[in-house]
């Protein structure tokens, strides 16, 4: 009965606008919650990819060092800089 008292005090258009705003709020909350879950999963995936890239970079440096040593190539500091 509180809703009917509210309608009689402020009028039907204002009460209908309040109810409409409540449904808009619920819809927006539902949409933002689903987007937030997707963003969290994307952040986790990006962190995993970052770890893979850094480990691959370290592996490439190790392979470069091994090949340079095995083929007796000059170190990076000893190579000329210009063409």
Image (tube, helix red, strand yellow):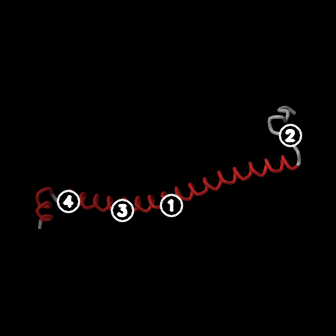
Which mark is in front, 2 or 4?
A: 2
Which mark is in front, 1 or 2?
A: 2
Which mark is in front, 4 or 3?
A: 3
At horizontal 32% and vertical 62% (from top left) the residue drawn is 26
Badge 3 vs badge 2, beta-carbon distance below 8 Å: no
The earlier-in-sequence mark between 3 and 2 is 3
Tag count: 4
Q: Position of residue 36 (x, y in %)?
A: 44, 58
- The residue that label 4 is drawn on is 15
Q: Quick check: 52 above or below 3?
A: above
The earlier-in-sequence mark between 2 and 4 is 4
When asked about the image quadrant of residue 51, the answer is: bottom right
Q: How far is the residue under mark 3 from the one under mark 1?
A: 22 Å
- The residue that label 2 is drawn on is 74
Q: How many residues crowd around disc 2 within 10 Å: few (fewer than 14), some, or many (20 or more)?
A: few
- The residue that label 1 is drawn on is 41
Q: Position of residue 24 (x, y in %)?
A: 33, 59
Q: How far is the residue under mark 4 from the one under mark 3?
A: 19 Å
At horizontal 86% and vertical 50% (from top left) the residue drawn is 70
Q: How many residues crowd around disc 3 within 10 Å: few (fewer than 14), some, or many (20 or more)?
A: few
């Amino acid at each position: 009965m509180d809703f009917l008292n509210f309608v009689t005090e402020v009028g039907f258009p204002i009460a209908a606008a309040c109810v409409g705003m409540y449904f808009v709020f619920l819809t927006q909350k539902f949409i933002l919650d689903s987007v937030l879950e997707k963003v969290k999963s994307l952040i986790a995936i990006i962190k995993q990819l970052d770890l893979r890239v850094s480990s691959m970079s370290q592996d490439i440096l190790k392979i470069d060092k091994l090949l340079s040593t095995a083929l007796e190539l000059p170190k990076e500091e000893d190579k000329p800089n210009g063409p």
